[in-house]
Image (tube, helix red, strand yellow):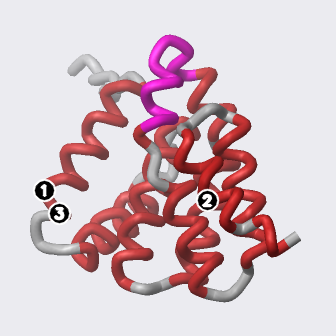
Amino acid sequence: MAKRQEPVRKSVKDVLEDLRAGHREAAFSGPEAALKYLRRTFEGQASLPNAVKAIAYDLTADAQAQCGLWEDCIASVASALGYLPDLEAAFPHEYRRLLEELTCFERGIQAHSELGDFHAALELCERASGLGLGAHYAAKRDSLEWAR
């Protein structure tokens, strides 16, 4: 009787590296190809780790913003931000670096501004500033103070 092979179990870090490599390759053909890759990844990976979903939704928001899909971008930003605790839990030593690499704050501010929701853009500026993600978010927040 043949021995049953165990399924290959990848670490969260390996899954993240696979996602980034696939996205990088797809993005060479433009943001539409990147979106297509990310959609297929979400559809084909029912058990995608939540920490990886944070990065996947961040990449999705970036591609959607490049395509001018502002409403979709806002939804992806919200999803990415919702998975930040999972990202921190899975990558406690790399969390700060990963957080600083995210584009979802910038893209969310852009999307909300494009749609005229300056209050929501201001809230994202405040959240990014609160996380210590850079003085440029404080400057953006200051420029949106009028939206209060």
Q: What's the distance in space between the residues labelled 2 and 1, CA to CA?
A: 32 Å
Which residue carries the number 2 mark?
A: 140
Q: What's the distance in space between the residues labelled 3 and 2, CA to CA?
A: 31 Å
Element assignment for label 3 = helix
The boundaries of the magenta stretch are 90-100
In the image, what residue type sits under mark 1?
Glu
Q: Which badge, 2 or 1, comes first in the chain's sequence? A: 1
- Percent position of residue 18, x then y: 25, 40
Disc 2 vs disc 1: Cβ atoms closer than 8 Å? no
In the image, what residue type sits under mark 2?
Lys
The residue lying toward the viewer, choosing from 94 and 124, is 124
Residue extending farthest to the top is 93
Q: Quadrant of residue 64?
A: bottom left
- Percent position of residue 76, x then y: 57, 65
Q: Which mark is residue 25?
A: 1
In the image, what residue type sits under mark 3?
Ala
Disc 3 vs disc 1: Cβ atoms closer than 8 Å? yes
